[in-house]
Amino acid sequence: MYEWSEEQEMIRRAVRDFVDREIRPHREALEFGDLPPYDLLRKLFSTFGMDAMQRDSFKRRIERERAIEAGDAVAEKAEGPRDANSVAFTMIPIIELCRVCPGMVTAMGVSMGLTGAAIMGKGTIAQKERWALDLLTMDKVGAWAITEPNSGSDAFGSMMSTARRDGDEFVLNGSKTFITNGPHADTIVFICKLDEGNPPAERKIVQFVLDSGMPGLEQSKPLRKMGIHSSPTGQLFLDDVRVGMDRLLGESLDAYGGKSGREASKATFSMERAGVAAMALGIVDRCMELSIAYANDREQFGQPIGQFQLIQLKLAKMEVARMNLQNLVFRHIEMSAAGVGMSFAEASAAKLYAAQAATEVALEAVQLFGGNGYMAEYEVEQLARDAKVLQIYAGTDEIQISAVARSLLADQAGAT
């Protein structure tokens, strides 16, 4: 795949028209936190039938899982590669939304792509039917709560939140921070350590599903931050929140033997990292579009600034980044269509490059615009602030470097 197909291009233009017509006019309200993004996202879903597609896909998956539980060997082998179009149609809205409000993609991605996927990946059929479908259709808002005040990059090692057995129930305590959708979440996947009286380093990582309004659960107001203001971020506080086994993902502690709890969370991280390339492509594409127009229109020293070689160098580097990011997106589409998932190291490498490319291009766009680029009136100012978070969330650049390097070293050691 080296370019969008005719059908995919048609969808891309339709989504871009929708974003320009329905979302761009609200950019300022979204940017200043006056308008939560969820109703606009639901309108996007309903306009393009994304909610109906999610319901159909969910129904087929549940039917297949029920057949497998009943011992149907044919159903167990039935799942094959995805259609390339269906994969592309999930990436196109991400790219187009990121040309205007990257934060909306973060809000959407965490709700359906992290919270919903965590339940679909680890939950029982009953749990999927109870919580996941509403998240996948954006009927409800989800939050995936792993980060704590003292456990950023060392998410598992420094985790202090706990679940303690008390008869047939668990008692949850702890706090989470930097939680996307935290202030508005209806459904929360809460990740913590199982306290069985053993040392913290030896405790299992477990996941519970919580609903807003549960006794002992407090959701903060949105936090103020540098960028992606269209994505509400908050804190969660749990004080003796009591839950039954039905809220433990998998409904059995046996499902968390060994490192399975950590691996389930890492799998969610891997999916999140792979999606950053599409986000970065949207940011870079819009920054380049704005920069080309400005370089043609802005005159200094008697000619358009696009005639100066240093400006041309900036534009050329932007195009290189755009091509590389587009190729990463196309590769992801082809791999998914072939039923091949990115390894943790591959997802980390893609995320590392995409985050750095988006940030560098956005900052160069600000530089190209000069004083105007520093003003909120110009879109590149917002895009530069929004791009920076890609180097921080879902694992910092430094963590991605470590993940890739450790994989390379392990592969070399295994080959000798």
Image: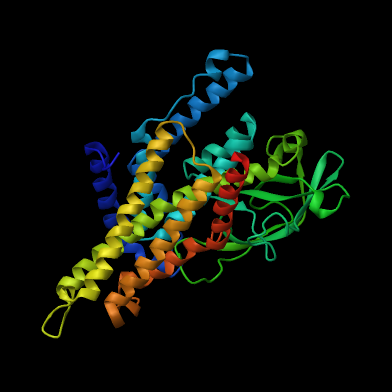
The residue lying toward the viewer, choosing from 259 and 405, is: 405
Please tell me which residue is depicted at 25% across the width and 46% down the height of the picture: 14
Query: On the picture, is 78 further left or further right than 263?
Result: left
Image location of residue 15, percent across then percent down: 29, 48
Is residue 124 at all visible to an observer of this figure? Answer: yes
Query: On the picture, is 307 further left or further right than 142?
Result: left
Image location of residue 352, percent across then percent down: 48, 57
**Occupied quadrant, residue 299:** bottom left
The C terminus sits in image quarter: top right
The N terminus sits in image quarter: top left
Image location of residue 276, percent across then percent down: 45, 53
Q: How is the image coloured?
A: rainbow
Please tell me which residue is depicted at 33% across the width and 35% down the height of the picture: 85
The residue lying toward the viewer, choosing from 192 and 347, is: 347
How many marks on residues?
0
Is residue 44 at all visible to an observer of this figure? Answer: no
Farthest bottom residue in view: 301
**Occupied quadrant, residue 357:** bottom left
Image location of residue 347, percent across then percent down: 50, 48
360, above or below 371, in the image: above
Query: On the picture, is 261 further left or further right than 202?
Result: left
Please tell me which residue is depicted at 38% across the width and 42% down the height of the picture: 331
The residue lying toward the viewer, choosing from 27 and 84, is: 84
Please tell me which residue is depicted at 58% across the width and 66% down the height of the picture: 221
Farthest left residue in view: 302
